[in-house]
Image (cartoon, rainbow, N blue to C red):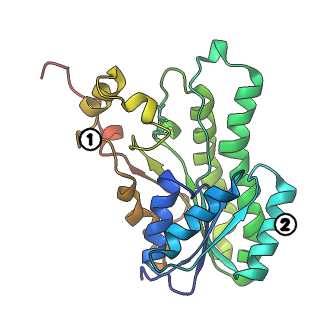
Amino acid sequence: MFDLNGQVALVTGATHGLGMAMADALGSAGATLVVNGRSSQEKIDKAVAHYRGQGFGAHGYRFDVTDEAEVVDAVEKIEREVGAIRILINNAGIIRRVPLLDMPLEEWELVLKTDLTSAFIMSRAVAHGMRERGAGKIINICSMMSEIGRDTVGAYAAAKGGLKMLTRNMATEWARYNIQVNGIGPGYFATEQTAPIRQAGHPFNDFIISRTPAARWGDPADLGGTAVFLSSAASDFVNGQVIYVDGGILATIGKPANE
Ligand code: GCO
């Protein structure tokens, strides 16, 4: 039930980080991978070589997930050149750590467009074909910030909170077409995005370790199993759920520093 052989999986933002880790897991389960990047063809080519180096079928396409015309063209090209997209993981995203009182409107709009509107654009572009074929899997990469906030990530939290509700509404409208739409909410993972707050001795690093019951940062490979589950027949009756892969941080208020 976890076999993805013969299925085409489009993972956005999979030239590095969590997207690459999830794509690796889907490739290991047999999926043919399609990865995208926005800017650097070199990065895309390097990522495709990484996947092909593991024996996975892999193809790279350069397009901007926030540009609907580019997305519609890319989906049409992918489905003509590689095959029908059965699995979409909306992973591409950015973060800007700026207090709300200081955040320029342009920055706010960039985060919302990249982290939330892109999922609407991408999912709608692939869902038409999934509805016609009577099957599909869409996974939106949410965040712990879909549930809680913290200083300086207000735009990101608003986008990720919206993405959780968009996931539920996509599930509401598309489950009848046998399209399962769900989310994954990563906790704190060791990636490029969190590198600035993971520096040894950085107060945030110590804080996260103390607030996480598993007492460690997530390893991107920790997301693979959940990504395969939500991409496979094992989740055919799962709709509108966000699975938090967070080491338990959302389950607890934490404990006093001296305990
Ligand atoms: C931050 C982090 C978080 C993580 C992740 C948590 O600045 O607090 O970047 O936002 O990236 O999204 O789920």
> Is 15 drawn above or below residue 214 in the view shown?
below
Residue lying furthest right: 69
- Please give the label number shown on residue 206: none
Determine whether, in the image, residue 140 is placed left or right of residue 74: left
Q: Amino acid at mark 1?
A: Arg
Instruction: Identify the residue shown where x is 50% and y is 36%.
Output: 145
Between disc 1 and disc 2, whose residue precedes? 2
Cβ atoms at labels 1 and 2 below 8 Å apart: no
Q: Secondary structure at mark 1?
A: loop
Mark yes or no: residue 237 visible: no
Quadrant hosting residue 173? bottom right
Determine whether, in the image, residue 173 is placed left or right of residue 183: right
- Please give the label number shown on residue 73: 2
Instruction: Identify the residue shown where x is 45% and y is 30%.
Output: 196
Determine whether, in the image, residue 64 is placed left or right of residue 199: right
Quadrant hosting residue 91? bottom right
The C terminus, quarter of image: top left
> Is 172 drawn above or below residue 178 in the view shown?
above
Return the x and y of residue 74 as percentages of the image width and height.
79, 66
Task: Give the labeled residue for mark 1.
Answer: 216
For the residue carrying disc 1, how many other residues have a C-alpha within 10 Å: few (<14), some (14-19), or many (20+)?
some
The N terminus, quarter of image: bottom left
Q: Amino acid at mark 2?
A: Asp
Return the x and y of residue 255 as percentages of the image width and height.
21, 26
Q: Secondary structure at mark 2?
A: helix
Distance from disc 1 to disc 2, alpha carbons, whole Å, reads 42 Å
Instruction: Identify the residue shown where x is 39% and y is 40%.
Output: 188
Return the x and y of residue 89 as percentages of the image width and height.
59, 62
